[in-house]
Amino acid sequence: MVNRINNIHNLKQKVFWGLVACVCSLAGLYGYFVSASIVNIIIRGETENEIAALHSRIGSLEARYLGEKEIVTMELASAMGFRRAPGKTYVARESVLGRSLTFGNNEI
């Protein structure tokens, strides 16, 4: 009888310490995920600031381009040694899949 009581007591202790370990593990995971979320929020804010700065830079470059575009003329290009291209040649590259997705001559 005493042996059975000791076994039950040992089982209760093992279950208790197992539950304590699970709770501690879950608390640790909770802390990790909360801190990871905070770091990601900070990084997102920094990234949004960088995107806003890049949009501003693009806007200023577009304005500069539009201003410079008016200055360049055919006379200026000729004076700099540029000349008109004699003819246009277009090159087409066949897709990787080729014609494998077509039905004959577009026949159904």
Image: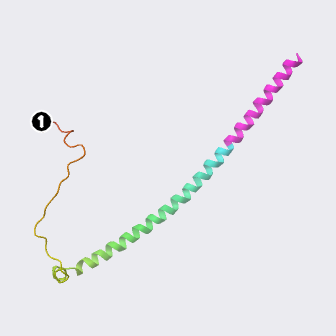
Q: Which residues are magenta?
A: 1-26
Q: Nearer the viewer, residue 106 or 90?
A: 90
Q: Is 24 part of what is drawn in magenta? A: yes
Tell me, what colour scheme is on the image? rainbow
Residue that numbered label 1 is attached to: 107
Residue at (22% x, 79% y) in the render:
72
Q: Is 98 part of what is drawn in magenta? A: no
Q: Nearer the viewer, residue 108 or 94?
A: 94
Residue at (89% x, 18% y) in the render:
2
Q: Is residue 40 above or below residue 55?
A: above
Quadrant in which residue 19 is drawn:
top right
Q: Magenta part mainly helix, strand or loop?
A: helix
Residue most extreme to the top: 1
Name the element at disc 1: loop
Quadrant location of the N terminus in the rendered image: top right
Q: Is residue 77 above or below residue 49?
A: below
Where does residue 4 sit, x and y in percent of width and height? 84, 18
Residue at (36% x, 74% y) in the render:
60
Quadrant location of the C terminus in the rendered image: top left
